[in-house]
Amino acid sequence: MADGTKIEWTDATWNPITGCAVVSPGCTNCYAMKLAGTRLRNHPRRVGLTKDTKAGPVWTGEVRFNREWLDQPLRWSKPRMIFVCAHGDLFAEGVPDLWIDHVFSVMALAPQHTFQVLTKRPERMREYFAGRRANFGRASEVLHEHISHGLSEAEHQDAVDLLDLFDSMGKTLPNVWLGVSVEDQKRADERIPILLDTPAAIRWISAEPLLGPLDIGRWAATAEVNCKQCKQSFWLHNADPCEHKDGGGWTLACPHCGGCRCKPAWTEADSRTMDMEPPADWIDREVGRFTKVHPTIPIKSGLDWVVAGGESGPGARPMHPDWARSLRDQCAAAGVPFLFKQWGEWVPQVGAVDGWTIPDDPEISRIDHRDWEDDRWGEPYRPMWCDDIDDDTVSRVGKKAAGRLLDGVEHNGFPEARR
């Protein structure tokens, strides 16, 4: 844990739980995993959390509850943004609900802080909140047994009452932001819908390391509509275009009954003769991946914040600049705050262009380069001539030199806290 951190989107880290397991490609070069198996391998709260492999330290799946660090945020009076379990995952498989109760109890006791929770296991997170009455009901026991920093009985009870209040309202704590890591489209498709099905004051995603292009349009711009056939409501991001016009997607199939705005009782004969113009009261309007939405339907974003960045450290994989630009532009179109954390090890080809501060011979580069070809990164090489910028080529200059400017702009968007 640290009161102060170099992580660009938070002020402090808090590690009441350490340890994790590899679950997806974004875990391959996890900084916490590498630290736990190298510089911190003999630390009492890291011993045994990793095992040595040919690829370096790898999480064993063991998790550890660090009770002596539990009340750390309560000692910080100045409001901070706090990254929860920066060296683990609060909702990891081996973490019992009781440990999570401890963490939420402390967060309830510290309303001056904003707690940023990030997980790769949204199923467990949703499951925990689905049973929050039982979970939060244990708060009194948790607070009295394990928080020993000198709070009064009244202060303890205030935290219990706050948890009970938000449980009865069907809401979670207003100072807790829930997020998921989404390094590629597959993980976005799997994790974001579950995040949106979980109660949270703020919902956010971290696309770091960004390992491929991301289309978040269906979640960044959505709307609640009513099916005219079954009369049930649904969100656009939970619906798919109907099958009556390949690739058009101008009308949606209700996820409840399958009904759509096309002609009822559609037949193959109809498909050969029917004019496929959309209904007159529907117009072109970009809403995520759907292009025909009635102009009177209010549009909102299911996501409150997007953080993106490239990978750093040994073995770092490059991020194509177009992937970062696409996320930036999607967020701008939907009005979602966007924070570009870093390029990481690799930046768009720098060579010896004017104004670049890294010394490099333009005739024989001393910096590794990689080219984007056939939808993959080629092997590193050092070109004989390198004096221009090419978005399909990246140069390995290191995190510090690469910086965090995207097309010359530093993006530091944050959501407005809703308390």
Image (cartoon, rainbow, N blue to C red):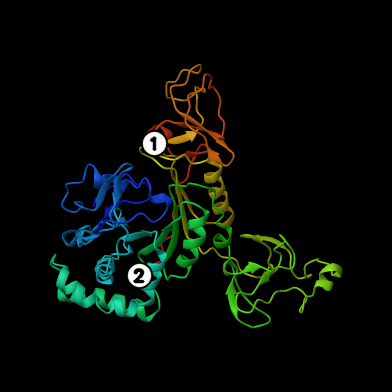
Query: In the rendering, at what x and y percent does residue 76 appear?
Result: 22, 57
Residue at (52% x, 54% y) in the render = 185
Task: Measure how far apart labels 2 and 1 are at the Cα level.
Answer: 35 Å
Report the number of discs. 2
Q: Indicate left or right for 371 with 130 as reference.
A: right
Q: Quadrant of the C terminus?
A: bottom left
Query: In the rendering, at what x and y percent does residue 25 appear?
Result: 43, 50
Mark 2 or 1 closer to N-term? Answer: 2
> In the orientation shown, which residue stands out farthest toward the right?
273
Instruction: Pick whichever, 197 or 383, lies toward us.
Output: 383
Q: Is residue 415 visible?
A: no
Give the number of the mark in front: 2 or 1: 1
Q: Which residue is mark 1?
A: 399
Q: Is residue 39 visible?
A: yes
Instruction: Pick whichever, 286 or 185, lies toward us.
Output: 185
Instruction: Pick whichever, 28 or 334, lies toward us.
Output: 28
Query: In the rendering, at what x and y percent does residue 191 appear?
Result: 46, 62
Q: Which residue is mark 2?
A: 173
Disc number for residue 336: none
- Residue 17's place in the image compared with 30, above or below, is below
Q: Indicate left or right for 276 with 163 as reference.
A: right
Identity of the amino acid at label 1? Answer: Lys
Q: Indicate left or right for 103 with 193 as reference.
A: left
- Residue 237's place in the image compared with 87, above or below, is below
Q: Secondary structure at mark 2?
A: loop
Q: Secondary structure at mark 1?
A: helix
Bin the neighbour count of mark 1 within 10 Å (Cα to Cα): few under 14, some 14-19, many 20 and up: some
Residue 78: quarter of image: bottom left
